[in-house]
Image (tube, rainbow, N blue to C red):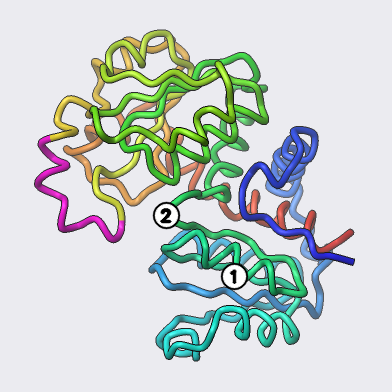
Amino acid sequence: MEPRHFISLLDLSSKELLSIINRAIVLKNHRNPDFQPLKGQVLAMIFEKSSTRTRISFETGMTHFGGSALFLSSRDTQLGRGEPLEDSAKVISSMVDCIMIRTFSHETVTTFAEHSSVPVINGLTDLLHPCQLLADMQTYFEYRGDIKGKTVTWVGDGNNMCHSYINAAHLLDFKLNIACPIGYEPNRDIVDSAGDRIKVFHSLEQAAKNSNLLVTDVWASMGQEEEQKKREEAFKNFQVSSATMDLAHKSALFMHCLPAHRGEEVTSEVIDGPQSVVFNAAENRLHAQKALLEFLLCK
């Protein structure tokens, strides 16, 4: 039987995504140390990009479930010495039960999945960050209930987080306003796939009006540090501040995938304020990914 991969949120149906979100909430609130559905199973974690939350959450999740996790960096394996991805995928998947990859090129993950005999999870690529969306959606459901029909505002670059929010809007049927400078729009094909749920604005104020959730990210992601000064100028009018939150619905929440640069993409008053659920969402990486691992490996 072909393995079930998680490369994009769109690898799930709407029903499956809702099931994982609800299961994550249950696992968070009713942890049973004796429940070890992955006892004896091994997750290989391949990191070409550094990580805090991704590594800790997956490794802890496997431990909670009775399994184990292997940390593999390109410096420590043949992946960094030019071994073909196809060969690495065949070899690594013959020895473990699941593979998580956090890397730059999205093609790295899709190629790995094509040649893997076990499930492959996208821990982040330059195109998509679906694991963060599992945690973000879990957090919204915990605080505000179903997100269907609500309005979310994404502030910043049309990056991997933005693309995954577009996919989430498609599956969970919410409206997504994208506020970004001209020239930093998201991938057009990904936008079109979600239909009329998506609107792109070049004004933060217009995009934020009556929103139920505001989300942002750093202005320069990993690999874009040389563009920092240019991006600071381009995004100077796209900082989420208290004034921005005042434009949103009175019960609006704020999220950020972290790490954050206070004083750039968000003010300290917002990220450390009463509407912020940033650190709750960070913790939920653990619970959402446990639900994902159970979904992929306990069929």
Q: Position of residue 232 (x, y in %)?
A: 13, 40
Q: Amino acid at mark 1?
A: Glu
Residue 159 as seen in the image, left or right of residue 135: left
Foreground label between 1 and 2: 2
Name the outermost residue toward the front: 189
Residue at the image position 61 percent from the left and 48 percent from the top: 8
Q: Find residue 62 and report its image quarter.
A: bottom right
- Pointer 1 residue: 59
Residue 19 to residue 57: above or below: above
Query: Is 71 rendered above or below residue 191?
Result: below
Mark 1 vs mark 2, CA separation in Å: 22 Å
Residue at the spot x=20%, y=57% of the render? 225
Secondary structure under tag 2 reads loop
* Magenta-drawn stretch, dominant element (helix, strand or loop): helix
Tell whether position 134 is magenta.
no
Is residue 226 a member of the stretch shown in magenta? yes
Q: Nearer the viewer, residue 194 or 297?
A: 194
Q: How many marks?
A: 2
The residue where tag 2 is placed is 126
